[in-house]
Amino acid sequence: MDANPPNPPQEPEAPGLLPSAVKVTLSGRSFSFYPPIRNLSHNEWRFVRETWSELLVENVDSGVEVWIPRRMLGAISSVEQPFPIVGLDKEMEFRAGAVWPYRPKLLEMPRPERTPQPEDASVANATGLLPTRKRRGSGSTATEHRLARLIGIALTIAFVAILLVLAIFRGDGIFGNRVILQTADQDYLSLGAGDDYFRVVQRLGPPQSDRWRTQSKEVAFRVLEYPDRAYSVILFGADQATATYLGAMDGNWRPIHAVSIGRGMDSTAMLRTLPRF
């Protein structure tokens, strides 16, 4: 079977086609999706064309073109730097050359085994013989059933506890947005959107290391490391002079602080997709 399914039919842009907000606002400009499309490391896109039901967008880094259903598009953020963000109504993933709704794998809970009924009790029920043994068999079966239920409940509680511990320490699952603070202080909480390099140094002091990485012509990231504080400060912008505060990462490169980027969204998703450098 072909791993890359054929593209949907290219419907002509008829005169009656109402242009989408993406085409009107962002045609010819780079933008990002939120939540980011899974299985694609670079979250920078450009509009190509649209039909009655879908939009064709191109990934700037890989050149991959995918069709996004119009019904999946949400609001466009008011943030212009480094580029606007287009909301998605559902989390999507890239596989087999197309995007699909993301469905996380579900773990099935183990079922407790049922204890078989003793043979002498079944014979007594069928023939009516040995009433004394029948009563003993019934009492023993009820006790075993209660014991099996207790074992099943204990196994279920232990299994749920293991899932909770894994979710907390991995930082995904049920507590995907929970942050376990492992820093020497929380002075980064005094920083906010719009704070530049000099504002950060004024509040936290000079960093031990200062690195700069360019993602594209419009976007670059600056990492200010503070090993003694056990976290790093992330700035982003078009160049070093205009880079402003985006958030903070702990020693394991997990977001511990983010800033609002408009329309009820923050920079957590951008921090999570930022590779360590």
Image (spheres, helix red, strand yellow):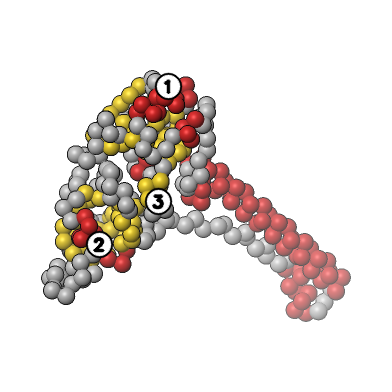
The kind of secondary structure element at disc 1 is loop
What residue would you read off at disc 2?
A: 21
Looking at the picture, tell me which residue is in the foreground, 93 or 267.
Answer: 267
Judging depth in this view, the residue of 187 and 176 nearest the camera is 187
Q: Is residue 219 visible?
A: yes
Q: Secondary structure at mark 2?
A: helix
Mark 3 closeness class: few <14, some 14–19, many ≥20 residues within 10 Å: some
The quarter of the picture where the N terminus appears is bottom left
Residue under the point 73% across and 73% down: 122
Camera-nearest residue between 161 and 202: 202
Q: Nearer the viewer, mark 1 or mark 3?
A: 1
Say if mark 2 contacts mark 1, CB within 8 Å: no
On screen, residue 89 above or below 203: below
Q: Circle 1 sits on which residue?
A: 205
**Labels 3 and 2: the sequence-earlier one:** 2
Amino acid type at image mark 3 = Met
| Residue type, numbered disc 2 | Ala
The C terminus appears in which quarter of the rendering?
top left
